[in-house]
């Protein structure tokens, strides 16, 4: 299966959040959002989120990973995990502008590496 990677960016106040969408050749109807659970960037420790995104894409799921403000390639000052609410709201707004359905992604918490319904509405 062919997998492509598309860089994405969206505004968060005066800053820019950067991410990557890993897309399979024939995506399923639902995608996956990987939101890291601590002060690390979208690749994760030992590239764990890269490997997870590639594996999910091989199974037909589009996957988005992004950097919080001040992490990885995103601009701004670093924040603690407890203060990334604005980042997640900005992601929500960007998704609403660019995708037709709020139900088109399944959040994945990096702390559990499993779908969760208790995550913010992303």
Image (spheres, rainbow, N blue to C red):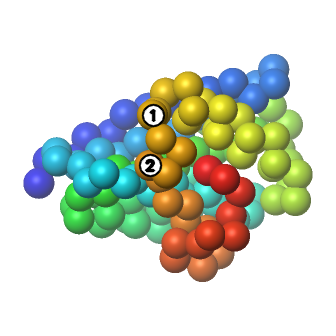
Q: Identify the secondary structure beneath mark 2.
A: helix
5 relative to 113 in the view: left or right: left
Distance between the alpha carbons at the discs numbered 1 and 2: 8 Å
Quadrant containing the N terminus is: bottom left
Measuring 81% from the left and 20% from the top, which residue is drawn there? Answer: 14
Question: Residue 61 is drawn in which quadrant?
Answer: bottom left
Q: Give 28 or 74, whichever is nearer the viewer.
A: 28
Q: Identify the secondary structure beneath mark 1.
A: loop
Q: Give 42 or 95, whichever is nearer the viewer.
A: 95
**Mark 1 — residue?**
100
Residue 19 in percent (x, y) is at: 53, 39
Measuring 56% from the left and 52% from the top, which residue is drawn there? Answer: 42
Residue 39 in percent (x, y) is at: 75, 58
Question: Residue 70 is drawn in which quadrant?
Answer: top right
The crowd level at tag 2 (other Cα within 10 Å; few <14, some 14-19, many 20+) is some
36 relative to 63 in the view: left or right: right
Measuring 16% from the left and 45% from the top, which residue is drawn there? Answer: 25
Residue 84 in percent (x, y) is at: 81, 49
The circle drawn on residue 82 is none
With respect to residue 32, does 9 lie above or below? above
Measuring 64% from the left and 60% from the top, which residue is drawn there? Answer: 36
**Residue 112 visible (yes or no):** yes
The crowd level at tag 1 (other Cα within 10 Å; few <14, some 14-19, many 20+) is few
Q: Residue furthest left?
A: 1
**Mark 2 — residue?**
104
Q: Residue furthest top?
A: 14
Q: Are marks 1 and 2 in contact (CB under 8 Å)?
A: yes
Total of numbered circles in the picture? 2
**Residue 74 visible (yes or no):** no
42 relative to 80 in the view: left or right: left
């Amino acid at each position: 299966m062919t997998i492509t990677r598309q860089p994405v960016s969206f505004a968060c106040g005066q800053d820019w959040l950067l991410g990557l969408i890993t897309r399979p050749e024939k995506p399923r109807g639902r995608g996956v959002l990987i939101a890291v659970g601590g002060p690390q960037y979208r690749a994760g420790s030992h590239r764990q989120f890269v490997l997870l995104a590639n594996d999910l894409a091989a199974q037909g799921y589009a996957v988005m990973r992004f950097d919080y403000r001040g992490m990885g390639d995103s601009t701004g000052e670093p924040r603690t995990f407890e203060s990334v609410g604005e980042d997640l709201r900005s992601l929500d707004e960007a998704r609403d502008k660019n995708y037709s359905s709020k139900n088109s992604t399944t959040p994945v918490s990096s702390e559990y590496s499993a779908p969760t319904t208790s995550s913010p509405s992303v």
